[in-house]
Amino acid sequence: MDRQEAFATRGTWSGHVRTEPGMVSGWHHHGDWESVIYVLTGALRMEFGPDGASTVEAGPGDFIHVPKGAVHRESNPSAEPADIIVVRAGTGGESTFNVDGPEQG
């Protein structure tokens, strides 16, 4: 993932993210930060919930909300790069915490 910061303050972060085809992130959460994602191009798959069994897929024009503390991973299942806009709001400090995996169901 290539993240480009557009704007940041103590309680917000926004930017553009490009994800190459087939890329899958590691499991993580954003602590006290919540995120809103807007898909510009390509596709985004978000896995979450017990055993990572729940998924949401989004394409151009779709929004995804990621609640505070939600363990998830994202991927680009399409054959083209995915471009998204991310806006995070929180209390400041670290915004990404890597974990071994989702909670077990």
Image (spheres, rainbow, N blue to C red):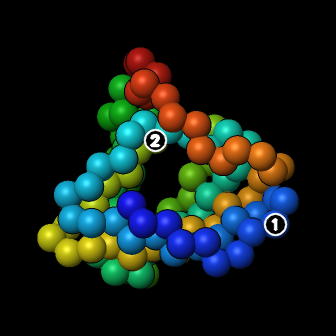
Measured from the top left, where is residue 78 in percent x and y? Answer: 19, 67
User: Where 71 sits versus 46, above or below?
Assistant: above
Q: Taking 54 as reference, is 77 left or right?
A: left
Describe the element under mark 2 as helix, strand or loop.
strand
- Furthest toward the left, the residue is 79
Q: Taking 102 as reference, is 70 left or right?
A: right
**For mark 1, what is the residue?**
9
Of circles 1 and 2, the one toward us is: 1
Residue at 71% over, 75% down? 7
Describe the element under mark 1 as helix, strand or loop.
loop
User: Where 98 sits versus 93, above or below?
Assistant: above
Crowding near the residue tagged with mark 1, few <14, some 14–19, many ≥20 C-alpha atoms within 10 Å? few
Residue at 51% over, 34% down? 98
**For mark 2, what is the residue?**
72
Q: Which badge, 1 or 2, is on the more N-terminal residue?
A: 1
Measured from the top left, where is residue 104 in percent x and y? Answer: 41, 18
Question: In the image, what residue type sits under mark 1?
Answer: Thr
Nearest the eye: 83 or 46:
83
Measured from the top left, where is residue 50 in percent x and y? Answer: 42, 27
Crowding near the residue tagged with mark 2, few <14, some 14–19, many ≥20 C-alpha atoms within 10 Å? many
- Residue 46 visible somewhere in the drawing: yes
> Cα distance, mark 1 to mark 2?
24 Å
User: Where 22 sits versus 17, above or below?
Assistant: above
Q: For the N terminus, give its image quadrant.
A: bottom left
Measured from the top left, where is residue 25 in percent x and y? Answer: 36, 47
Q: Taking 12 as reference, is 80 left or right?
A: left
